[in-house]
Image (cartoon, grey):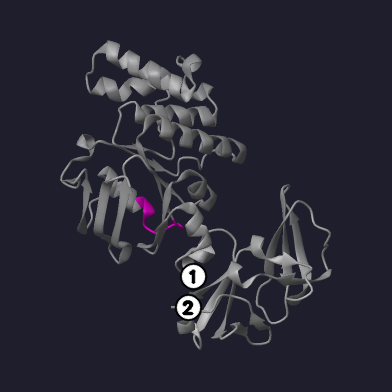
Amino acid sequence: MTEPLVRIEAVSRRFGEIRALEQVSLEIRQGEFFALLGPSGCGKTTLLRILAGFEHPDSGSVTLDDADLLAVPPHRRPVNLMFQSYALFPHMNVAKNIAYGLEREHLPKAEIRERVDAVLATIGLTGLARRRPNQLSGGQRQRVALARAIVKRPRLLLLDEPLSALDKKVRAEMQLELKRLQHEVGITFVVVTHDQEEAMSLADRVAVLSEGRVRQIDAPVPLYERPADLFVADFIGANNLVTGMVGADGLQVPGVGVLPCPVPAAAVGRAATLAVRPERVRLGTEGGLAGVVRDVTFFGGTTRVAVDVTGLDRPLLATVAGATAVALGDKTRVDWSASDAMLLGND
């Protein structure tokens, strides 16, 4: 396993009565794409600003290569931050924008030219070096901002909601571009985002934050398939969540029946929440729960069907491949295998 580049240990930060971070500990490995994911106000941007040097924690430690990062002023840290707005200089062309940081370090002109040309080739904008930002598309401006950040060859590149200003199609293209670029340049990337799909598609590992605390750190697949708690299960992707009492043969829900799920012996007799992903739910089975189709939403490759089941306070969701034969108002049945569900404690 790759050695950690950054270690964050028991970091806390408050702003008056607001708890932004509470005893946050995590490690970021050399060369990985790491995502800080969570809703607005969860502390992810505060943590990013601490890494950049724009905030200082009230307690805790942050090291980079086992050296105290908090003791290093922002302009001397081997860390670059790419802002959400890109912050390009409008009066400078692309090449000048990229070269700005190197010129401030008074590097030889030949070295600056060589590094700028190399990074322009990496981001695929060699032919646009003389254009100004207002002559570029949103995706191209994002590439220039990235190039300006990586041309200084930082150990750590921080990205604050880097794709939020792009439309959906360009954002999908730039997700692929960011991943390719990160692998090519070999710099450790840390991205802050509230977009689950963005985090899951970009990152090698994701830290999910809520109310200033880390709820789970994992790779995208186990994070999706084995959420650590109710918050993660509800925040990461769509999920069917049903509360009841654990019995020997499943989750007992008053007015509904017994729902299939694995039952750990220690959980019997306790209140719990069953979680089952929509793609694991089957429609039109002979067994299962009877319901009425409340909504059908076609997404092209898949269809999301919402089914009202008597006794449940919200519809069960099922995702099926392609189009579906069921329509609004149809009676149907929903079911899933016990092994496709999981139980989560209610504490």
Q: Is residue 205 above or below residue 281?
A: above
Residue nearest the viewer, comparing 346 with 130: 346
Residue 138, percent across and down? 53, 31
Give the side of residue 193 with respect to residue 237, left or right: left
Left or right: residue 243 compared with residue 204: right
Name the residue at 29% across, 33% down. Answer: 154
Where residue 20 sits: x, y (%)? 33, 60
Q: Residues within 10 Å of mark 1 (few under 14, many from 20)?
A: some
Is residue 347 left or right of 107 when viewed as pictured? Answer: right
Q: Earlier in the sequence, mark 1 or mark 2?
A: 1
Q: Which residues are magenta?
A: 38-45
Expressed as whole percent of the image width and height from the top left, the position of residue 259 reads 64, 79
For the residue marked with disc 2, what is the amino acid? Answer: Asn
What residue appears at the point 40 percent right and 27 percent down from the top-left corner? 147
Q: What secondary structure is the magenta-colored segment mainly? A: loop
CA neighbours of label 2 inside 10 A, class few (<14), some (14 to 19), many (20+)? few
Q: Position of residue 110 (x, y in %)?
A: 29, 10
Tags 1 and 2 in contact by the CB under 8 Å rule?
Answer: yes
Q: Residue at x 29, y 58 (%)?
A: 25
Residue 89 visible from this viewpoint: yes
Tag on residue 346? 2
Q: Residue 106 in magenta?
A: no
The residue tagged 1 is: 230
Helix, strand or loop for disc 1: helix
